[in-house]
Amino acid sequence: MNPNSMDTSSFSIPAMTVQLGQYQAAVSARLADFNARNFTAGFWQKQADLWVQDAEAQQSVRSFMGWLRVAETMLPHVEEIQQFAREVRAAGFTHVVVMGMGGSTMTPIVFKQAFEKSADGLPLLVLDTTNPGSVREIEEAVSLPETLFVVASKSGTTAEPLAFGDYFYARLKELKGDKAGENFVAITDPGSKFVTQATAEGYRRIFLNFAEVGGRFSALSYFGLVPAALYGIDINTLLERAIEMMRATGSAGDVAHNPGLELGVALGVLAEQGRDKLTLVVPENLTDLGLWLEQLIAESTGKEGKGILPVAGDPLSGPEVYGSDRVFVYVGFENQPDEENRRKVAALEAAGHPVITILLRDALDLGAEFFRWEVATAVASAVLRINPFDQPNVQAAKTATDQLMKVVVERGALPQTSTPALEENGLSYYTSVTGSNAADVLKAFFQQAGADNFLCIQAYLMETPALNTELNELRALVQQRLHIATASGYGPRFLHSTGQYHKGGPDTGLFLQLTTDHAQDLPLPGRPYTFGTFQNAQAAGDLEALHNYNRRTLRVHLGSAGEEAGVAQLLQDLRTALVAE
Ligand SMILES: O=P(O)(O)OC[C@H]1O[C@H](O)[C@H](O)[C@@H](O)[C@@H]1O
């Protein structure tokens, strides 16, 4: 047996192989230390001093550890959820739209891509952006009277899901009058204000989630399971696989090898040694797992100037373009060759980069993986000595956005932004660096990049395949020319995810924010503003928050250029700016 292969023989869980090369000794030593301190037993007993020492923080840690046994808690609820799914189908619904942010929608996004819809499942769409074009796209893709809208918000106070719910409720009201509520389902925490609203509006069903389960640890609760059952996924097996992983990580007593502990210690120690960019490599049908992992890892670990940056969707290249800030994690399927990715990962391993490989037997193993990664993230946070269960810096952007929205309500528009450093070809550049043309501004901005830095594209635009292709080209260009990691996210989705790391993690990011004028905006019923203004306020609020943390930013307002044409222009100027040496 390979000495680095973990002994998973007694548990039926996906195989994991860890090749750490020169880092193996340090990781093994830390693992021995954790085991000597009975970390696994303390973990299952919710011993908060494994993370933080302050009494108040310890109380908070304990109060967010309900996820440890949520798979077991949910098993008796499988029949209730499946019965609900049957009722929905019997009532003639043809589509399901899940609406929410961050942890409340990440899991359905993963499911939708990783599983083929089963014969008795309903097509699933997810709305997690305030972009007016995306909202309209969803509206046009479904027949409203035959669509079930699932409003998912743990706190019940998040601005976006409430706006989505209000928007579609008003549309249904026009069509069905007082019966509009039949098309709505809520998933939220008991006692949230949203429960009162959903009750008053006659929602078909309100699923009260279990308290003490934070958003990014809620995959195996109602938040993941209700959409999964509606889509026709076998949630019973999903939970059983998760429970098997629970046992492997010590839920039922001592284990020789705890796969969550071993993964978490490896990631934590690697991060301490500068390998803090967890670069995910996955086959096509698991790319959205990257979104889920981004939220879990970045929001849990990216604080107090520390953290692990999950890098999803970075173009996979040869060893020569990567610095010593990477650990590569390949998650794929046992029976899927995925040859190109695996060949490249093997080359990276041969070149001395640490590589972790996880092979799923089928998509139902995601149940097990969600749990493995939750444990590993909590463990890596213990290595880094931070509280994995809070997100203190997410609030900074929300507060700045709220202030801006107050101005919108009072004055009817967002306040004027500062003067651009440059305007060229319809694009406006807002940044502290200067240049006499766009290529010069871009050059000056990227000249700030150090070896362990990363580019983060924050696109407050409508996600389309064409735009995704352009943004990938942009990432590839930066990677090839500057040899730094690149991340990319659509706003406001990433605000509830990697946004925590951007402000709370190490100051290594170069932030490229892309905004637009929203030529085709959409009003929000009952509010004196549009979706487009809301999205722009979120961009402006986050930019302000990034500045308050002294982050290096470049905002490119695409203005009237149009989103794809504007980014194409930016790409062209960037090619000039980053000429090969
Ligand atoms: O489910 P909700 O309460 O609406 O929260 C949705 C998201 O909002 C916040 O921004 C948190 O940072 C996320 O962790 C959370 O998942």
Image (cartoon, helix red, strand yellow):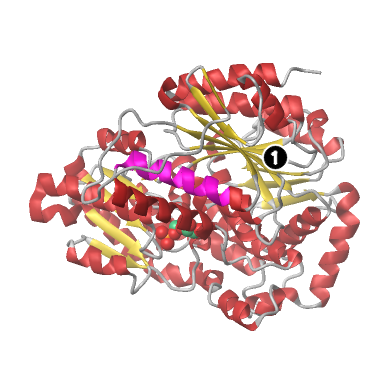
Identify the residue at horizontal 50%, vertical 66% (top origin).
214
Magenta highlight on residue 531: yes
Q: Which residues are magenta?
A: 530-546
Q: Position of residue 115 (x, y in %)?
A: 46, 42
Q: Magenta part mainly helix, strand or loop? A: helix
Identify the residue at horizontal 35%, vertical 41% (top origin).
533
Identify the residue at horizontal 25%, vertical 63% (top origin).
205
Q: Can I make out residue 160 in this image?
A: yes
Q: Residue furthest bottom?
A: 55
Identify the residue at horizontal 34%, vertical 70% (top origin).
192
**Left or right of 113 on screen, residue 530:** left
In this rendering, the count of numbered labels is 1
Instruction: Name the residue carrying label 1.
Output: 454
Q: Can I make out residue 12 in this image?
A: no
Quadrant housing residue 282: top right
Magenta highlight on residue 347: no
